[in-house]
Amino acid sequence: MGISAQGAEHLTMKIGRAYKHAKEFDALVVAHCTRKDLFTATGREENGRYIVRVEYAPQDGDITLSLADFAYNLRSGLDQFAWQLCLAGGGTPGRGTMFPIFEKDDPPTQANFLKCVSGMPPDAIDVIRDLQPYKRADFRQDPLWQLNALANLDKHRLPAGRSSDTSFYIEPVGFIKTDFDNGIELSWPLCAKDRVKVEGKTPGLTFGEPIDSSTPSAMPLELTRQDIAEIYRYVREDVGPRLIPFLT
């Protein structure tokens, strides 16, 4: 087997396709957040409390689909690039060949890491090891970890998009807030009913695991538009340039 004539271009093409989906995703999010009928607020009395339920207008399904396509292209691009790196190192890529992304540094993880990079140039392996999320103080802030988590989520469920509670001016203080997908509930003692005010502002959306997931993660994924943009930038400007020279 020889190195593909388009070895490095595999990643470049995937990055380009991911960019198109990222731009579409961003435009759809902006359009959703600025619509005039973005949310409705309804009040009710229940068990001696006054409850306001705020529900957001259903999101366009293309928002999550474009985000999922973004994650797929970027993550699979890294795996295809790993295949080419293995060929460049004189190895024979197989089912276990992939771009490793790990949050822990322990013996089982290192064993898996070596399986993923088997056959790659030693210097390339050193670069990939240096890029591992566990190298950071908080691996959850690492763009590669976020990309991997997003891609894994998309294999089974579409990433959920929900609005953050910074979207409102709320008074009086002292309310109890309950989150659910597509909105929140705010609860006050009944005596505060006449003073309740909920004014909507342009919300900030976060994307990740659904709040009402039947198997919630201990560390749920929550990404903003800015996080998605940083994932793309990181792969394009930090990861790719450090590894492409090994295919030259």
Image (cartoon, grey):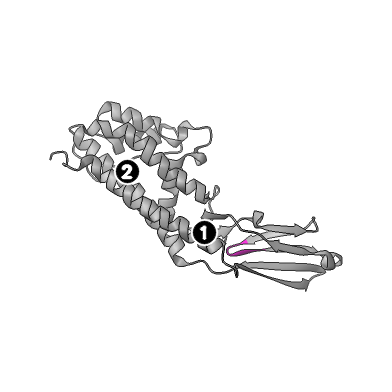
> Which secondary structure lies at badge 1?
helix
Q: Say which label, 2 or 1, has the lower sequence index.
A: 1
Q: Which mark is residue 78?
A: 2
> Which secondary structure lies at badge 2?
helix
Q: Amino acid at mark 2?
A: Leu
On whether residue 8 falls in the magenta region, the answer is no
Disc 2 to disc 1, how far (Cα)?
A: 29 Å
Instruction: Give the extent of the magenta segment.
Output: 180-184
Q: Amino acid at mark 1?
A: Val
Quarter of the image with the C terminus is: top left
Q: Is residue 198 left or right of residue 18?
A: right
Q: Residues within 10 Å of mark 2 (few under 14, many from 20)?
A: many
Kindly identify which residue carries mark 1.
30
Label the magenta part by its dominant secondary structure: strand
User: In x, y percent, where is residue 200?
Assistant: 67, 62
Residue 58 vertical placement versus 179 (above, below): below
